[in-house]
């Protein structure tokens, strides 16, 4: 590109062309969906199985994996942020959305005793907000479908005991995080990202 | 109606391209701008300096390991100037 004078029409065309280039076409955030999907499935199934079939005293021990998840997410987010050649507003909003939801979810879980440990319906509702908004931001329908699954399971979770809620949690993240996560990963591979 | 004169700082191909890129993102690396505009590093550097001197963009230079990293960001003055430029250019295009 040279430093030449432009006609008004050429100027408008150039503005349009550059704005088009800056618009992000596809984002691969599958890492986070797969990480949190698997952590939640392992922790919730471990919780359900040990509480139902064993006399193990700490069925909730598996949830300590979420601390590992939080650390891995922070490290990856930080690294990606530092090495990115361009910072988009969409990425920024996306990061803040999930960070805010994460804070809300951890607050609910750490205060679970005040809810008689009926935390899962609230977590499912919040996860649905995250996947629905992310799906809209990324124009990615599997996440929006995942959100509907989360909300339907939340309706059911309000009606069962905390132990059975763990099964709904596992089902929720399988459809809401893992399925969209794997589709996103395979799309990213196809698009060479 | 008399036409407003177009901002000479923006009415140039490379500087306008840089501003159009930066208006759509929060911040961008020198390397990214170079790739998207296809400009030479020398020319781009000169034009970025001009935009920065005018207060249209802010430029942050730091080192990442041993590699220099220059990050550009549009300022509110730059956004105003860009909006004004687009408004004025539309006058010229009106039938």
Image: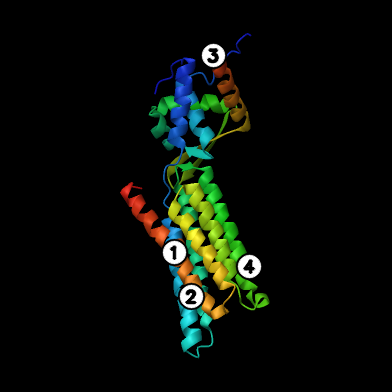
Return the residue found at the far bottom. Answer: A55
Asked if the residue at tag 4 contacts the one at tag 1, i.e. Cβ–Cβ closer than 8 Å, the answer is no
CA distance separating discs 2 and 1: 13 Å
In front: label 1 or label 3? 1
Residue A86, position as x, y percentages in the image: 47, 41
Which residue corresponds to mark 2?
A167
What's the chain of the residue with tag 1?
A: A
As helix, strand or loop, the secondary structure at mark 4 comes to helix
Q: Are marks 3 and 2 on the same chain?
A: no
Which residue is painted at 40% across and 61% down in the image?
A179
Q: Are marks 3 and 4 on the same chain?
A: no
What's the chain of the residue with tag 3?
A: B
Residue B11, position as x, y percentages in the image: 51, 18
CA distance separating discs 3 and 2: 65 Å
In front: label 4 or label 2? 2
Residue A114: numbered disc: none
Q: Would residue A104 appear left or right of A131 to someone viewing this image?
A: right
Disc 3 residue crowd, few under 14, some 14–19, many 20+, Cα 10 Å: some
Residue A175: numbered disc: 1
CA distance separating discs 4 and 2: 21 Å
Disc 1 residue crowd, few under 14, some 14–19, many 20+, Cα 10 Å: many
Q: Name the foreground residue: A182 vs A39.
A: A182
Which residue corresponds to mark 4?
A107
As helix, strand or loop, the secondary structure at mark 3 comes to helix
In front: label 3 or label 4? 3
Residue A119 higher or lower than A12, as above or below: below
Asked if the residue at tag 2 contacts the one at tag 4, i.e. Cβ–Cβ closer than 8 Å, the answer is no
Colour scheme shown: rainbow
CA distance separating discs 3 and 4: 57 Å
| Precedes in sequence: disc 4 or disc 2 | 4
Which residue corresponds to mark 3?
B92
As helix, strand or loop, the secondary structure at mark 1 comes to helix
């Amino acid at each position: 590109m040279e430093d030449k004078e432009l006609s008004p029409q050429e100027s408008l065309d150039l503005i349009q062309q550059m704005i088009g280039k800056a618009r992000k076409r596809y984002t691969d955030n599958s890492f986070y969906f797969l990480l949190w999907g698997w952590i939640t499935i392992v922790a919730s199934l471990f919780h359900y199985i040990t509480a139902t079939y064993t006399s193990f005293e700490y069925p909730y021990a598996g949830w300590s994996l979420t601390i590992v998840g939080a650390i891995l997410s922070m490290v990856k987010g930080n690294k990606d942020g530092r090495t990115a050649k361009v910072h988009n507003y969409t990425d920024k909003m996306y990061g803040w959305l999930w960070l805010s939801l994460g804070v809300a979810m951890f607050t609910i879980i750490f205060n679970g005793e005040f809810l008689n440990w009926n935390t899962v319906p609230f977590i499912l509702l919040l996860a649905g907000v995250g996947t629905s908004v992310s799906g809209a931001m990324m124009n990615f329908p599997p996440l929006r479908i995942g959100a509907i699954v989360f909300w339907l399971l939340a309706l059911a979770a309000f009606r069962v005991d905390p132990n059975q809620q763990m099964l709904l949690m596992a089902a929720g993240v399988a459809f809401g995080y893992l399925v969209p996560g794997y589709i996103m990963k395979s799309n990213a591979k196809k698009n060479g990202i | 109606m008399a036409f407003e004169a177009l901002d000479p700082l923006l009415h140039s191909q490379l500087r306008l391209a840089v501003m159009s890129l930066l208006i759509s993102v929060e911040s961008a690396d020198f390397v990214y701008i170079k790739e998207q505009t296809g400009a030479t590093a020398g020319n781009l550097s000169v034009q970025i300096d001009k935009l920065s001197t005018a207060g249209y963009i802010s430029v942050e230079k730091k080192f990442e390991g041993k590699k220099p990293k220059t990050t550009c960001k549009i300022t509110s003055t730059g956004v105003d100037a860009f909006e004004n430029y687009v408004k004025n250019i539309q006058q010229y295009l009106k039938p």
